[in-house]
Image (cartoon, rainbow, N blue to C red):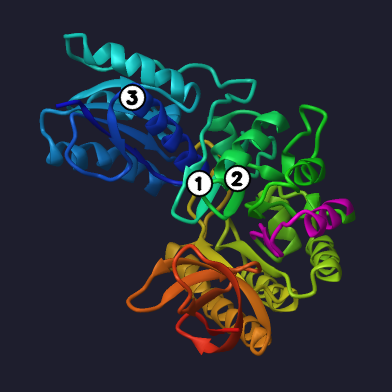
Amino acid sequence: MGMKAVVFSLGCKVNQCEGQAMIAELCKRGIDATDKLEQADFYILNTCSVTGEADRKSRQTVSRVLKLNPAAKVYVCGCSSQNDAFAFSDKPNVRLISGTGGKLYLVERILNDLSASGSGSRVIVSALPNEFEDNIFPEHTKTRSYIKVQDGCNNFCSYCIVPYLRGRSRSRQPESILKEAQIAALQTKEIVLTGINVSAYGLDIGENLASLVRRLGNVPARKRIGSLECTVITDELLYAMAENGFCEHFHLSLQSGSESVLKRMNRKYTPEFYLKQVKKIRKVFPSAGITTDVITGFAAETEEEFAQTEAFVQVARFSDMHVFPYSERKGTKAYELPQIPKSVRQERANRLIEIGKQMHKEFCKSLLGTCAEVYAETDEGGETAGYTANYVKVYSDLPVGELRSVKLKNIYKEGVKAEKL
């Protein structure tokens, strides 16, 4: 019997991609590795630190895996251990604690440790890398591949710890991305470009996002871009996407519709500028799905500032919103600002979630009677569910794995019901 390993990744898509790369590396070395939490000989916990809650969950995962196998060796890496390695050093069975850099190199160290005796945890958190660490494999679901094109962030938004844990923005070479996309297209029909700040892609290597989009034009798959900053939207990028098989879906981080709150957040745009960018998108993609993130109850947010956000999101007409009550983060600038009660943050989030649901329904209604290409991804008890290019969930009787045009008939569950043409 060979060895069994679990690589469990918490948090963002970039972490998931890196976890999949570690799984591929372990499999290459003859170890049976999975991302499912199940019984195994050893566990690699790829942690997240985006909020205090994420840190807590990351630490708790050690106990969770030891319930599955009390004798297992545990290895920790990722953002939470980069933030505070010693929070893991007193946990039972933890052998090595690494950070966000060198995750594939960590596999080598783990294999050496497995053959060594001795106890006690060793902390090997090192300085953050300056260059993109390549050799990342696509993360495949049945129908999607996530390809990491960039790491790190230079924005230093006042609420965010990530630049301190992931380092400065660094881009992957376009040839390497293209090669991986071509491999991914043999296995899946949709590719998603992901990164910590995809908008900054190429700035450090003499490239830009539009040139990457053009390079991927001949890859035979539907293509999406993950989250974007509104500042990166240019006519050049929009026309490159339109001409090279990219989906008309834009996840444009907003965070607040109040100019004074955006200033405190250290976001580099005004609500007016954001709206201008939304109009620019709709000029090239009239039925674009534009989704966003909003933080409610940010430090010192007044009722008036929140009302500005409520009004703004309705003018922007988002197709969907991710709404989060603000969670203060030690080590960030916003942590030092006056805070408002958590109950107020949550109450504002609830109000915005309701507006978001209404806008989502209106967007779905606007598409009824039209034809759309749908990618059937999951079986949901006798019908399949998948997404249109502009990211509306569609239920149909297409077989899983099919990408085909259907007619959007009526509002159904949290999306739309369709019929074959």
Q: Can residue 368 be seen in this view?
A: yes
CB atoms of marks 3 and 2 within 8 Å: no
What's the distance in space between the residues labelled 2 and 1, CA to CA? 7 Å
User: Which residue is under mark 3?
Assistant: 86
In this rendering, the answer to whether 331 lies above or below 243 is: above
Report whether 67 appears left or right of 360.
left
Q: Choose mark 3 or mark 2, whichever is in front.
A: 2
Residue with the mark numbered 2: 194
For marks 3 and 1 on the same chain, the one whose residue lies earlier in the sequence: 1
Q: Closer to the camera, 71 or 260?
A: 71
- Residue located beneath label 1 in the image: 13
Callout 2: SS: strand
Looking at this view, is 387 or 49 the one in front? Answer: 387
Q: In which quarter of the image is residue 297?
A: bottom right
Residue contact between numbered discs 3 and 1, judged by CB atoms under 8 Å: no
Q: Which numbered disc, 3 or 2, marks the residue that appears first in the sequence? A: 3
Percent position (x, y) of residue 146?
54, 46
Q: Which of 375 and 61 is in front in this view?
A: 375
* Label total for image: 3
Q: In this view, does 99 lie above or below 355?
A: above
User: Is there a contact, CB below 8 Å, between mark 2 and mark 1?
Assistant: yes
Residue under the image location 33 percent in, 28 percent down: 76
- Quick one: label 2, few (<14), some, or many (20+) residues within 10 Å? many
What amino acid is at disc 1? Lys
Answer with the quarter of the image where residue 28 lies. top left
